[in-house]
Image (tube, rainbow, N blue to C red):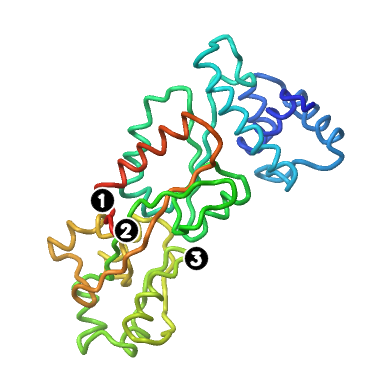
Amino acid sequence: MLDYSLLVALATVVQEGSFERAAKALHLTPSAVSQRVRLLEERMGCALVVRSHPCRATETGRHLCQHVDRVQLLEHELRSVLPSVDPLGAARVRLPIAVNADSLATWFAPALTAFENEPSVLMDVTVDHEGHTTEWLRSGAVLAAVTATAEPTTGCSSIALGTMRYRAVASPSFMARYYSQGVNADSLARAPSLLFSTKDDLQARWVQRLCQHHVELHRHTIPLSQAFVTAALAGIGWGLHPQALIQQYLDGGSLVELVADSPLDVPLYWQRARAASTVLDRLTQVVRSAASVPLRNDI
C-alpha cells in the first residue's frame, strides 16, 4: 500500500521545483519534506527526484506523480458526495494539460476563463508544439492536450476540434525589399524567415507546397506568439501566423500575404485521459465550445 503523504511530498517537490518551496506549500519544514521523499525512495528502491535546479522527477518518480494527479481527481469527485473526504491533504486539485502556443494565444484562453467556476481546480498548463503535445500525454505528465494527432494515445480519447488557419505574411517594407521580383524559391532562400522553435515546421511546409521542393531558409527564432507578430510587423522576417491573431493587421495593411489566398490549415484535436472524471468532462465541454468559433469545422 502506497503512503499518500509521501507521494504528495514527492509530487509537490516536482511541481514547485525545490524542497524549500514544497515545504511552504505543504506547511512543513524542508527537512520533513526531504525525509518523506527519502523514505519513499527507500521503499521504492530507487531515486525519484533529480536534485537539480529546478528539481525534476526520474522516470519512476514521474509515474508516481501521474498517479497522484489521477487519485486527486478521483478524490475531488468523491468530495462532491462526501464533503468530509480530505483530498490527499490538499485544498485544491491540480489538472495538468498541454497546449500549443498559438491556441493559447487565440482561442484556448477563453476556455480557461470559462472553467474558472471550478474554484477547487488549479490548471497546470504546459506549452509545446501541437505535433509534440501527445508526447506529454504518452509520458503521463498531463491528463489532456490540444494536439495535431488524430490517433488517440493509449488510454485517451480523441475529439476533432477543427483546423487553425495560418497565413504566410510580412510587412509591406519587407515585401518590397525581398520580393519585388516575386515570391519563389530563390527569393525565399534569401529572405529571413521567422521560426517559433526548432519544432516549428510550418514555414518549411508552406514553402515545400509552394515550390514543390525543399528550400533552405534563413531564420530568426522567436518563441512567443505575440512577439512573433511584433517581429513580422517590424519587418524582421516573414512567417506563418494564425489568421485569428493577425486579421486586424491584414485588414489595416500593416501585414500582407506573401502569396494571396495561400493559407495553411492545421487540424487540431483534444485528447484526454479516459478515466471517469466530471472535471475532465467539464473541461472538454468548454474546450470544444471555445474552439467552435475560431477554428474551421472541416475535419
Whole-percent x, y for residue 60 in the image: 75, 44
Q: Which residue, given by chain and number where applicable, does mark 2 sit on?
A: 164
Quarter placement of the N terminus: top right
Position of residue 39 relative to residue 255, above or below, is above
In the picture as drawn, the residue positioned furthest to the left comes out as: 252
Q: Is residue 299 left or right of residue 121?
A: left
**Residue sitting at x 35%, y 39%:** 111
C-alpha gap between disc 2 and disc 1:
8 Å
| Amino acid type for the residue under numbered disc 2 | Met
**Mark with earlier residue (1, 3):** 3
Whole-percent x, y for residue 177 in the image: 24, 82
Q: Nearer the viewer, residue 225 or 227?
A: 225
| Amino acid type for the residue under numbered disc 1 | Pro
Dot 3 crowding, Cα within 10 Å, few <14, some 14–19, many 20+:
few
Q: Which residue, given by chain and number where applicable, does mark 3 sit on?
A: 199
Q: Which residue, given by chain and number where applicable, does mark 1 sit on?
A: 294
| Amino acid type for the residue under numbered disc 3 | Lys
Dot 1 crowding, Cα within 10 Å, few <14, some 14–19, many 20+:
some
Whole-percent x, y for residue 150 in the image: 46, 57
Q: Are marks 1 and 3 in contact (CB under 8 Å)?
A: no
